[in-house]
Image (cartoon, rainbow, N blue to C red):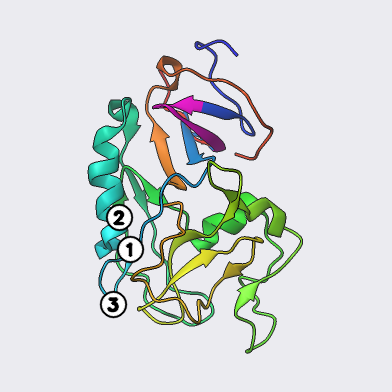
Amino acid sequence: MQANNPPKIGETIQFSNYNWQVLDIKDGQALLISKLVLEERAYHEKDEPITWENCTLRRYLNGEFYNKLSDKNKIAKHTISNKNNQWYGTDGGNDTTDHIFLLSLEELVQYFGDSGKLKNRPNSSTWYINDQFNKNCIAYNPLGSAAWWWLRSPGYRSFFATFVNRVGYVYVQPHLLPLVGWRRSPCLVAKIIAENPKNAEFTAFFPVKKIFFKKV
């Protein structure tokens, strides 16, 4: 693909020396998510009630990680909605404006497949979503091994955050996983908005799903 051709939904592109999957294209902007689990970090470094707005992972992504990206001037800030947990009503906190962020439960099913189980919990003893879209949700580390990865939505209590496990189960109630100390997270399964994608190098590797690009 030529550098002056904007990417399409379903492609993988190279941006700031990482490969990103195109999740959606809307209003002239490209929405991207990293192809691999790039780092292992806790959602929050203290064992205390927390929301995405105040967690240490958000601070890292929009600070140290953002600042080391070579194309950070092409990343636009984006206001994201932090909804309550649909099964338990756990407070999602305030909406935030971020350069880089994790998927929410709602965005995960929007882009990777929605069986309706998030809105309609199968029964009161169900802790996770296990459906025909599990395979779409599996993330891999650079060594090719499947890895757990964080979502930004709260779990059944504010001491917990939601996540996807190695086989693609989406844990809406992470029952044994405290925020502190859990390291197998692709904290860079994060969406970014590319302000000027024509100035980035785009290469198609795999068919995928969706994204956003700013008009130039």
Is residue 113 within the magenta segment?
Answer: no
* Residue positioned most to the bottom: 124
Percent x, y of residue 4: 50, 10
**Magenta residues, as a range?**
14-23
In whole angstroms, how far apart are the C-alphas of marks 2 and 3?
16 Å
What's the amino acid at mark 3? Asp
Q: Residue at image x 67%, y 71%? A: 117
In whole angstroms, how far apart are the C-alphas of marks 1 and 3?
14 Å
Mark 2 or mark 3, which is nearer to you?
A: 3
The mark that comes first in sequence, 2 or 3, is 3
The kind of secondary structure element at disc 1 is: helix
Q: Quadrant of residue 132?
A: bottom right
What's the amino acid at mark 1? Trp
Percent x, y of residue 36: 52, 43
Main secondary structure found in the magenta portion? strand
- Circle 1 sits on which residue? 52
- Quadrant including the C terminus: top left
* Residue positioned most to the front: 143
Q: Residue at image x 64%, y 79%? A: 121
What's the amino acid at mark 2? Arg
Percent x, y of residue 170: 59, 66
Q: Which mark is residue 58?
A: 2
Q: Quadrant of residue 52?
A: bottom left
- Circle 3 sits on which residue? 47
In whole angstroms, how far apart are the C-alphas of marks 1 and 2?
7 Å
Is the Cβ of the residue at disc 1 closer than 8 Å to that at disc 2? Answer: yes
Q: Which mark is residue 188?
A: none
- Quadrant including the N terminus: top right
